[in-house]
């Protein structure tokens, strides 16, 4: 499957994944979520100020978040492979990985798979859709030899129901 990924880094954070890993994670999500003959995704890695500004503008939440997905809204007759844009906040991903006892690589993989599935139309607003999306994320990540993202132990001092994503608000 021809996959084009444009990556822009607007972050001072170190420890970012390689472009090869980003392509592998997005490619796995596309293959499992909705096979396409070709696809184009833009990934922008940002710091907290930009993530917060975008999250406030587009979601009404005045705080930085781990990943934002902006599906392309193109007329079908254009037949372009553009899926949309992912904006990943490097400091939030790093902090969440540490807080959740995950490797940074595993958490980056989860955020890019999660965001890509949003570009494909998956969502987690209602419980049934959330179960479907989380199941697919788990299948993709375990096939990539990462731990299941929703099986982690709760963060000490916080109460979280089983199956609730710790990194993305519902």
Image: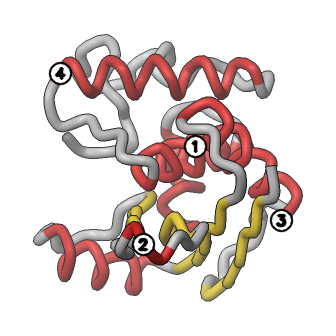
Q: Which mark sits nearer the N-terminus, 3 or 1? A: 3
Q: Residues within 10 Å of mark 3 (few under 14, many from 20)?
A: few
| Picture disc at residue 17 | none
Helix, strand or loop for disc 3: helix
Q: Which residue is mark 3?
A: 19
Q: Measuring 50% from the left and 23% from the top, which residue is drawn there? A: 136
Residues under labels 2 and 4: Cα distance? 33 Å
- Which quadrant holds residue 159? top left
Instruction: Identify residue for label 2.
Output: 77
Tell me if I can see residue 87 in this picture: no
Q: CA distance from mark 3 to mark 1?
A: 14 Å
Q: Work out how far the residue at label 4 is from the one at label 3, CA to CA, in angstroms.
A: 33 Å
Mark toward the start of the polypeptide (1 vs 2): 2
Q: Nearer the viewer, mark 1 or mark 2?
A: 2
Is the C-beta separation of discs 3 and 1 under 8 Å?
no
**Residue depicted at x 54% and y 34%:** 33
Q: Quadrant of residue 74?
A: bottom left
The residue lying toward the viewer, choosing from 169 and 156, is 169
The residue that disc 1 covers is: 113
How far across and down, in percent of the image, does residue 168 sit?
33, 45
**Up-down: is 115 above or below 114?**
below
Residue at mark 1 to residue at mark 2: CA–CA distance: 27 Å
Name the quadrant of the C terminus: top left
Whichever of labels 4 and 3 marks the residue nearer the N terminus, that label is 3
Task: Pick the residue in front: 125 or 47.
Answer: 125
Label 2 close to label 4 by CB (< 8 Å): no
| Disc with the residue nearer the chain's start (2 vs 4) | 2
Q: Secondary structure at mark 2?
A: helix
**Residue tagged 4:** 127
Residue 168 visible, this angle: yes
- Measured along the vertical axis of the image, is residue 20 above or below residue 14? above
């Amino acid at each position: 499957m021809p996959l084009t990924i444009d990556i822009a880094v607007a972050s001072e954070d170190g420890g970012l994944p390689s472009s090869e890993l980003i392509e592998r994670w997005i490619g796995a999500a596309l293959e499992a979520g909705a096979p396409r003959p070709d696809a184009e995704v833009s990934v922008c890695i940002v710091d907290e100020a930009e993530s917060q500004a975008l999250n406030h503008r587009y979601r009404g939440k005045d705080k930085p978040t781990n990943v934002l997905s902006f599906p392309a809204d193109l007329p079908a007759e254009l037949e372009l492979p553009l899926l949309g844009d992912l904006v990943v906040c490097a400091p939030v991903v790093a902090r969440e990985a540490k807080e959740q006892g995950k490797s940074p690589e595993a958490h980056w993989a989860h955020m890019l798979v999660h965001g890509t599935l949003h570009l494909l139309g998956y969502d987690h607003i209602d419980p049934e859709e959330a179960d479907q999306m989380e199941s697919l994320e788990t299948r993709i990540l375990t096939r990539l030899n990462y731990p299941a993202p929703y099986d982690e132990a709760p963060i000490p001092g916080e109460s979280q129901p089983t199956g609730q994503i710790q990194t993305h608000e519902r």
